[in-house]
Image (tube, helix red, strand yellow):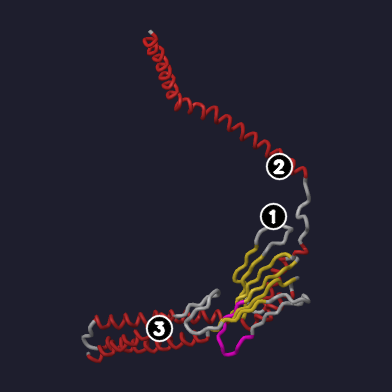
Amino acid sequence: MRRVIASIMAAGLLLAACAGGEDAAVETGLSSTSGGGESTTDESRGAAPDDGSELRVDLDVTDGRDIIRRARLDLHAAETRTAFEEIIAEVESVGGFVANAEVFPTDDEDQQPRITMVLRVPADQLRETMTAIKASVDEVVAESQVAEDVTEQVIDLEARLTNLQALETELRALLQEVRQQEGSDPEKILRVFNELSSVRGQIEQLQAQLNHLEDLTTMATLEVGLTRTPSAVPIVDQPWAPGEVARDAVRNLVTGLQGAADWVINFALYAVPMLLVTLGPLVVIAVIVYRRWFRRQPEAATPAEA
């Protein structure tokens, strides 16, 4: 029995040691750099050369490192719908996919909409995909890339996962041993089972974090913004229609006259009766008081003159 209790206490201490590093768990995202370990972030933005040549912003992928890569392209195209379809075809051809796309509606179907999209492409195909996308449009307005090193975070998570898996194996063996003892105490079995369940939950949490990091490092994120080329935008979107302007003016005039007539009707049928009901008694009382006061004035002055 002492051996069982000692084994449970040892498992509890090992579990506490593994859980002590939980506060240092690394949360990773596409818009921030977390601090579970040292991380490096390199960012550079392309600027248009004087000779109008193609923009180039390239960050080399380091072998043996876990790198989260993100990039953005702001593009101009004469036919944004066509460019959108070509970009989708290019991304799918390298094994990527469209994570999100938004087409902003326009008043006229003939106009070219503004389009934004979020693409996921294999990290080793990011440079080639960006080059092909830039070649399919009229102009590259802006280009940027970001590389985030999460190698130490991955190593830390893997080490903690290995320790927890070893602890889980020991707890399973201990649980089997306690169950096989004659007259085993159900409370001791429950304590071991609870410890085992806690370890299994931590293992699944660490595994989920590792899977998330693996997805971010394997597939790069590329944001693309498509707008119509300014030179392709007509000076006047719609021809001048004086007839429609005149109809709008007459419509506004009729609406204004209707509003004025509505105000007069409301004033005559609502405001005037309300004034009579609320102010009428006060006016009558004021007239009566005024008359009585003036009648007393001559009566008071007559004895004085006599």
Residue 285 forms part of the magenta stretch: no
The tag earlier along the polypeptide, 2 or 3, is 3
Return the residue at label 2: 248
Q: CA distance from mark 2 to mark 3?
A: 71 Å
Q: Quadrant of the C terminus?
A: top left
The tag earlier along the polypeptide, 3 or 1, is 3
Q: Amino acid at mark 2?
A: Asp
Q: Position of residue 49 (x, y in %)?
A: 74, 77
Which segment did they paint magenta? 60-70
Pointer 1 and pointer 2: residues touching (CB < 8 Å)?
Answer: no
Q: Position of residue 6 (x, y in %)?
A: 26, 90
Asked which secondary structure carries label 1, the reply is: loop
Task: Specify the farthest residue to the top.
Answer: 306
Instruction: Say the numbered circle drawn on residue 107.
Output: 1
Q: Main secondary structure of the magenta part?
A: loop
Return the residue at label 3: 21
Asked which secondary structure carries label 2, the reply is: helix
Residue at point 71% right, 66% down? 80
Task: Specify the farthest residue to the left.
Answer: 183
Residue at point 41% right, 80% down? 23
Closer mark to the observer between disc 3 and disc 1: 3
Pointer 3 and pointer 1: residues touching (CB < 8 Å)?
Answer: no
